[in-house]
Amino acid sequence: MNENKLQEMIEKSTRIVFFGGAGVSTGSRIPDFRGVNGLEKETAYGGLTMEMILSKSFFYLHPDLFYRYYREHLLCPDAVPNQAHLKLAEMEMKNCLAAVVTQNIDGLHQKAGSRSVYPLHGSIYDNVCMECGRPCSFETVLETEGVPKCPSCGGVIRPGITLYGEAPDTLVMRGACREIARCDLLIVAGTSLTVEPASSCLSYFHGKTLVVINEEPLAIEKEAALSIRGRVEEILDGIQVPERPQRVRKNWWS
């Protein structure tokens, strides 16, 4: 079975990195963007698409409409980590996983206990005042009606996600690419690989083994040593995580 092959690959690998997309969080009842029932298929506010509303220009021109859509579709306060998030956190705790590179903004990897996480598109929890730079809580953005304002200076609160038309955070991208370049097993899961420049991170992989876990076929599967069709949380939940000695890091680049 493919799951047995994945187990064997994990046990034989020395440095594993996980690259995930929206399909990792659909098991937590968070809608994806480009699936059959994804947000991309919806239109709102006069026929505007998701990409239009979640763009940098729309945020600056119509922050009230932006935040209305943002609260309705992107903020899921009741979402909890599923088996995929929990298994990856366990893998890191047992020194079996070097890093998680995620396209998701929901913070569920961190909630599950993962510490080495590279959120390529930011996080709904990292909000900041555009005037004074004061951090703003998730609860303030969620519970405020209209455009959330800074309690210190009254400036508009800016969500901590990468909007369409913006480049991802340079340090996060650099760290993600570095981790992918250094791993010998890369697991790509729950992603359409259509969003750039996030998907370009995979070009840095020159390791031994590529594994793809996805419900839909991907072009990258032709390069994979193993391809598993299915839900990410169900596949990962069956993995028995080997415990390894803690790796000593002499320098930040080691």
Image (spheres, grey):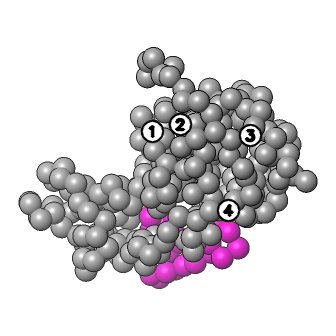
Q: Residue furthest right?
A: 1
- Check residue 106 for magenta coloring: no
Could you tell me if residue 178 is visible in this image? no
Q: Is residue 37 magenta?
A: yes
Provide the secondary structure element on which disc 3 rests: helix
Left or right: where 56 falls relative to 3:
left
Q: Amino acid at mark 1?
A: Val
Q: CA distance from mark 1 to mark 4?
A: 25 Å
Name which residue type carries label 2.
Ala
Q: Identify the amino acid type marked 4.
A: Glu
Mark pair 1, 3: CA separation: 25 Å
Residue corresponding to mark 1: 172
Other residues around mark 2 within 10 Å, as few (<14) / some (14–19) / many (≥20): many
Per the image, the residue denoted by label 4 is 233
Question: Which mark's residue is nearer the viewer, 1 or 4?
Answer: 4
Q: Which mark is residue 176?
A: 2
Mark 3 surroundings: few (<14), some (14-19) or many (≥20) residues within 10 A: many
- How far apart are labels 3 and 2 at the CA level? 20 Å
Distance, label 3 to label 4, CA atoms, is 16 Å
CB under 8 Å between callouts 3 and 2?
no
The amino acid pointed to by label 3 is Ile
**Badge 1 vs badge 2, beta-carbon distance below 8 Å:** yes
Residue 237 is left or right of residue 31, and the answer is right
Q: Which mark is residue 10?
A: 3
Camera-side mark, 3 or 2: 3
